[in-house]
Structure formats: structure tokens, C-alpha cells
Amino acid sequence: MPLTRKELAGKIEHSVLHPEATRQDLQTACQMAIEEGLAGLCVHSGHVKLARSFLGASPTALVAVVGFPLGASASSVKLEEMSFSLMNGATHIDAVLNIGWIKEGDDANVRREFRQLMDLADGKPLKLILETSLLTTDEIKRACRMALDVSIPYIKTSTGFGERGASVEDVKLIRSVVGKEAKIKASGGIKTIEQTLALLEAGADRIGTSATLNLLGATQT
């Protein structure tokens, strides 16, 4: 079903995560987020304070990435980064899974880190980034189940820095595990309106993209 520009904007979290992002890039992105009524703006922890100053009291969520993009940071470092981001105005956190722990079956450490992240979030939305391109079907399912065990509210497919981005198959697989217990953010490599609509139809609730204006320009008014 076609979406209006306003309806699609309400599902997009615009990403400003490229390493060369400047102050002007952030200001431009924040202005667009406000004018278009975007669901969120996703930035690095070091850019949270500046982005908050540009967004002001806008209802657009300020999303900070944690342990990005590899997920291999020590849990204590992830928690410190998360705390810093929340203190400086982030309202959502997108944290990367420790992929190595999933690969080696270290579920105890995976669960422990999930609980610590959820405790620190203290009611603010937390999204778990899986990096589906690096995981098997069984590993994706295990990670999703453990996320549900501690009530992580969102599962996010990818960082956008992996071998590939989100796919319809990824979203369907995640939805088959989480059902209605969690929301899904499809992210990574989403450049066209056709991709976007297919991912939403497959079960995604949010779209993470840096191609926001191209997508909005392709919708009905």
C-alpha cells in the first residue's frame, strides 16, 4: 500500500554515521528531520550533544549508536558510551551485538550484556543491532530469543558497514521469532522506495537510511 510523504517520514530514522560527517552535515540533517517530521536521527555518541542542540525540543528521536560498528567493545565500554549518550540528550540507543560471543555460543555473556544495557536504558527504547550478514539463521534466532528474554523492544538488522545491508528475508526471519513482542528496524543499504516498501511489507517498523530525501521524494504527497 503506497505511503504519503508524511507517513513514510514517520517511519524513517535518518543516519549520519559516515566517519567524515561534519558539523554542517549534522545541522543540515537535524533541520531536515524537523521539517519532515522524521521518526529519528541516528548519530555517533560524539555527535549527540551537538545534534541535541540542533534538534532542540523536536519530537524526532535522537538515536545514539553504541559499540558501533563492530560490537566487540568491552561491555563496560559500551555502557559508558551509552551513559554518555543518554546524559547528552539521546532518547534511543542502537547497540551492536557482540558477534563473536554469538558465534562461539557464549550465551551467558550475551545475556549479561543485554541485561546491563536494558537496565541502563531505564525505559528508553533500546535497539539491538544484529549485523545479519555475519550471522547464520540459527544465530539470528538465538540472538532474538535472548533479546526477548530481557524485553529488548527493537531488533535492528544491520549497521550499514557489514558485508550487506537489510534484506526482506532478514526481516521475515526476525519477525518469525519476535512476533509482536518486539519491533524491527531495517537498516543498511536502503536506497530506493521499492526496497523500503518491501521491507515494511515484510514486517519492518522502522527504516534506517541515509537516503531519506530520495525516499521521501519518491512518495505520494
Image (cartoon, grey):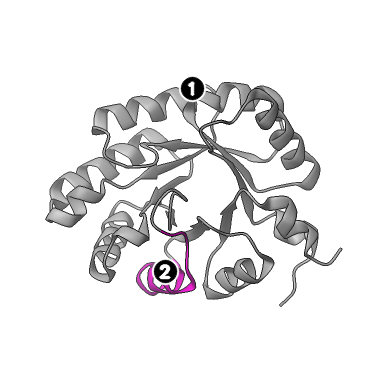
Q: Depth-wise, is mark 1 or mark 2 nearer the camera?
A: 2
The C terminus: image quadrant: bottom right
Q: Is residue 194 left or right of residue 205?
A: right
Name the amino acid, label 1. Met
Name which residue lies at 52% across and 71% down: 203
- Look at the image and tell me whether residue 56 can be seen: no
Q: Nearer the viewer, residue 104 or 25?
A: 25
Give the x, y percent position of residue 99.
25, 50
Judging by the rendered image, the residue that carries numbered circle 2 is 170
> Circle 2 — which element?
helix
Residue 195: within the magenta? no
Residue 169: within the magenta? yes
**What is the span of residues highlighted in magenta in the rendered image?**
164-180
Judging by the rendered image, the residue that carries numbered circle 1 is 87
Name the amino acid, label 2. Asp
Give the x, y percent position of residue 138.
23, 69
Name which residue lies at 58% across and 59% down: 190
- Principal secondary structure, stretch drawn in magenta: helix
Alpha carbon distance from label 1 to label 2? 33 Å
Give the x, y percent position of residue 132.
36, 60
Q: Is residue 46 left or right of residue 29?
A: left
Q: Residues within 10 Å of mark 1 (few under 14, many from 20)?
A: few
